[in-house]
Amino acid sequence: MFTSDYLRELSDKAIASLGVSPEADKLFSPVRYILSIGGKRLRPVMCLMACNLFKDKIDEAVMPAVGIEVFHNFTLIHDDIIDKADLRRGSPTVHSKWGSDQALLSGDVMAFVAVECIGQAPEKVLAKTLRLFNRTAIEVCTGQQLDLDYEKKGLVSESEYLRMIELKTAVLIASSLKTGAIIGEASEKDQDLLYECGRCLGIAFQIQDDVLDTYGDTKMFGKKTGSDIVSNKKTYLLVRALEMAGGEKLRRLKKLLEPGNQNPEEKVLAVRAIYDELELRLHAENLAYDYFNRAFQALDQVTVNAERKNEIKQLAVNLIGRVK
Amino acid sequence: MFTSDYLRELSDKAIASLGVSPEADKLFSPVRYILSIGGKRLRPVMCLMACNLFKDKIDEAVMPAVGIEVFHNFTLIHDDIIDKADLRRGSPTVHSKWGSDQALLSGDVMAFVAVECIGQAPEKVLAKTLRLFNRTAIEVCTGQQLDLDYEKKGLVSESEYLRMIELKTAVLIASSLKTGAIIGEASEKDQDLLYECGRCLGIAFQIQDDVLDTYGDTKMFGKKTGSDIVSNKKTYLLVRALEMAGGEKLRRLKKLLEPGNQNPEEKVLAVRAIYDELELRLHAENLAYDYFNRAFQALDQVTVNAERKNEIKQLAVNLIGRVK
């Protein structure tokens, strides 16, 4: 079995080898940039690992795996325009470096570079691979739409929130694993189990991410904690707090969410105090672990030798275990 | 042979039947809108006509033809954001109706709806159809990049201009015809001839469009003439004028291009006077007819009965003949 380090290198090499048009260097500079400023290559690594569950030779999965990563980075460029974000992975965002128009157009070309990579799936599974990719891409856009809609909506239910992160984040992880399984010629059943595994992992991962933004260690987490609170982002914690808090507590929370000149650090502490009163960290971590366990249950049912699953399991543990 | 009217209706019906996600109506409203505010369905009609050259049954080409139209409309939404255009086909643009963020995201989802349609090509030609589509999509983005770059560049050569319109406009027309030929199971040679036919038609069409904006009849053309001159758009006429004019004439032209409070109607008349002195309308129309003839020569070589080509020829004549 290939290790995640090896598969990450393999993905990086394939990404570096992506052809670009010499005719419009300005178009492709932002593409090279976003693909070069880090990122864990989680999605291609998971795709390749899933393929490796069923096959020792995984070459045919490399370009489709890269296609998923290129697609993911395309969404980051466009999401950052909409969010007016200045930083991504600690570096300037594409639109803050090149302007929104360039970020829009370079993002667009990435969408088709992604499809071009997906199009290199073996011909006998091309139709299925492409169908899964398109359905997923449309779902990711739908998730981003719900995210934007929910930011403007007063009350968002827990189930609305979970569906939003499922679409925005989890289906692409699910699709990464399933794409690998399809190219690995797994049975339909195993393909679907891996999809479910990825879907649950993605949801667990996003809930953990919300917890980390509020409770994480800045040094370990790599970004300043509390930024979600400062920006009133509808995280799992805030969604649940607005659902659960009542009376004086709800009034206090709503007051804190009003735009104003309040000190950001005080705001973080005050909102976190309400979360603590509602025991929301515990709620959130329990829910994340619940999804995490469902992911493992699905993986356990995949009909290959348990030993072959160790790399995926280890990757999942590292991913979710960040909170510890 | 199917008539262009019939094929237009067929395309319209298939477009109306496109599935949308019930989960995010806001995401798909702009998609339905842009696809409903007219447009000649030129690209899907050409795709279906090309298929019909080789086959009497064209059902398998319908969804890929629609995919090309959806892609074309996706580029319009994003181009209009970049150009800050208020109107498209006489109706408000998507971003002026829903805002830039929504136009960005709804455009994105259209890109994948387009690929989803292309993905419905028959399995035995799917890889080839998809490869052509992706190459074309990347070229169209490259053409848009060159267009933006050239707007900021002082001097653009005739050949640079021609390459830009080839990428931005002509390759998608070329690709429409070739896609139909591929699905019609034409020989490689005939596929390439139809690509060349569409490429030349597309270039001819764009040059005519530039001429019409300056010299067309407002009523017939459907948009106010002179808008390109008012906005200093680098049309074929302006590019050639800047190349050909010298001395006093060049100074006069450059003065007219300076931003200022000059009366738009006077500007149009004064710039047009310089074009007339340089006989640029004649130059442009000759060049357009040259490309038009090359398109017909390529079509003539396609190895099907001459009679079967009548619909495509008539469509091309109607398209280019608008200037008369």
Image (spheres, coloured by chain):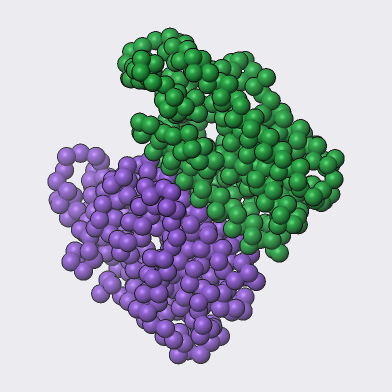
Chain colours: A green, B purple
Compare residues A267 and B37 and report the one nearer the observer.
Answer: A267
Quarter of the rendering containing residue A242 = top left
| Residue B312, image x, y percentages | 42, 79
In this rendering, would B244 be left or right of B149?
Answer: left
| Residue A254, image x, y percentages | 35, 20
Q: Is residue A292 above or below residue B186?
A: above
Q: Is residue B222 above or below residue A111?
A: below
Residue at left offset 53%, top offset 60%: B116
Compare residues A244 and B39 and report the one nearer the observer.
Answer: A244
Locate the C terminus of chain A and report the quarter of the image it occupies. top right
Residue at left offset 74%, top offset 57%: A187
Q: Could one spot residue B143 in this view of the protein?
A: no
Residue at left offset 26%, top offset 45%: B257
**Outermost residue toward the front?**
A247
Compare residues A252 and A31 and report the one nearer the observer.
Answer: A252
Compare residues B282 and B162 and report the one nearer the observer.
Answer: B162
Locate the N terminus of chain A and report the quarter of the image it occupies. top right
Quarter of the rendering containing residue B322 = bottom left
Q: Is residue B151 above or below residue B272?
A: above
Residue at left offset 67%, top offset 56%: A120
